[in-house]
Image: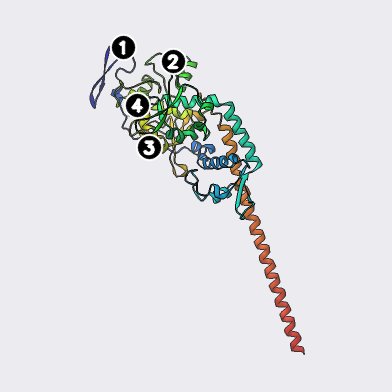
Amino acid sequence: MIFNFKKSTAKAVKLSYKYKVQSLPFLNFQRYSYVNVYMKWKKDSYFDSIEHIHESIQLKPIIALKNCIVRDPNGCIPISTVSKRGLELDVPVKVARFLRQYPSIFEEFTGPKYNLPWFRLTPEAAEIDKDEKRVYEECRGELKARLRKMILMTRENVLPLKIIQGMQWYLGLPNDFLQYPEQNLDESFKFIEMEDGLKGLTLDSGEKIYSAMEKNAMKRGLYTGGPMEAIEFPFYPSKGLRLRTKIENWLNEFQKLPYISPYDDISSFHRNSDIVEKRLVGVLHELLSLFVEHSAERKKLFCLKKYFGLPQKVHKAFERHPHMFYLSFRNKTCTVILKEAYRSNSAIEKHPLLRVRKKYIKLMKESEVILRNRRVKNRFYNCNAELDLDSNNLNERGHDMTSCSLEQVM
């Protein structure tokens, strides 16, 4: 059966289906096409104040340095071990300076040789590290499942290792996850050589994968798992965000479109159609739902375009759907946040590592108190030193004046 989709600005697009459908709500969906719309960004203080999202940028290099310390057999390292690895570990300043910014996590002491500064974890940080390792051990299967889903969302079920390594922080995978495939992966994962000379990880999987949207709709009895069923995205408008009537009409029709799973092939659809736009939004929704903080730096998602078959202007999807995604511009970067994950009625599963990262961030904040107290003590000591110096000077002057008076009497 062949359906014709009419659009005012383009020729009719023909899509073929092998099954018979009596009535579909999206037969004329392209008449409301508004995919080139510009929506004004609206600041939302709630999402801008979620601490574990915006502190994640500072936490990442802290965890990287922490791992360098715990991997050492002695549990401590000289500064020379990491001083030249700042770029590799994403440290924004000199490594020694960075370590000293977090005395609640890193304890500095003088080493046995050459009086070099050495660093080890504080007892509080060491305890959280143990908790982190327990989570990795107990949730290895879930972490593997999240990686599996990410690979299955790609066009050819394969991702370069360098892309996976770049997304490990968001997926919550330990840094050495790919170094121990026998321990962390099963036989369905295979390492291959890709056409562009890169090493990749592919996956053989014949099982049906359901997205977070599909699972939630099934629980609510709104989805049976059949093809081309409509599933509405959960919308969470920010306060004060008002849309023009044209945009609201387009969004209403957009919600009625069939939901195409991020794990399904869409090569038969026209890339400029609204149904492909909805599938793109579904991919971004599913991808962010897999991440620890359900957020990511927007620029880091751009590296996925080639392998996920995303359009060149994928960033426009975030701007066109402010009811689903929030763009935060804190920390001099643009962070994409999945709104649904931070609502009380959210159906998004929490990442098991999130609790551990919140502990690290809380410990990070204690460093500010420690450094503040040190500055106060230094000022106090400096003031006392100045008072002692002034007192000594006054005593010396008094002694000189007494000597002069005695000389005059003589």
Q: CA distance from mark 3 to mark 4?
A: 19 Å
Q: Secondary structure at mark 3?
A: loop
Disc on res. 40? 3
Disc 4 residue type (three-letter): Glu
Give the residue number, with chain letter if any, for mark 4.
Answer: 277
- The one of 246 and 60 positioned closer to us in this rendering: 60
Q: Quadrant of the C terminus?
A: bottom right
Q: Secondary structure at mark 4?
A: helix
Disc 2 residue type (three-letter): Tyr
Give the residue number, with chain letter if any, for mark 1.
Answer: 18
Q: Quadrant of the N terminus?
A: top left
Mark 4 or mark 1, which is nearer the start of the sequence?
1
Give the residue number, with chain letter if any, for mark 2.
Answer: 223
Q: CA distance from mark 2 to mark 1?
A: 21 Å
Q: CA distance from mark 2 to mark 3?
A: 33 Å
Circle 2 or circle 3, nearest the eye: 2
Mark 2 or mark 4, which is nearer the start of the sequence?
2
Marks 2 and 1 close (CB-CB < 8 Å): no
How crowded pointer 1 is (Cα within 10 Å; few <14, some 14-19, many 20+) is rated as few
How crowded pointer 4 is (Cα within 10 Å; few <14, some 14-19, many 20+) is rated as some
Mark 4 or mark 3, which is nearer the start of the sequence?
3
Q: Secondary structure at mark 1?
A: loop
**Res 377 → quadrant:** bottom right
The answer to whether 285 is drawn above or below residue 48 in the figure is above
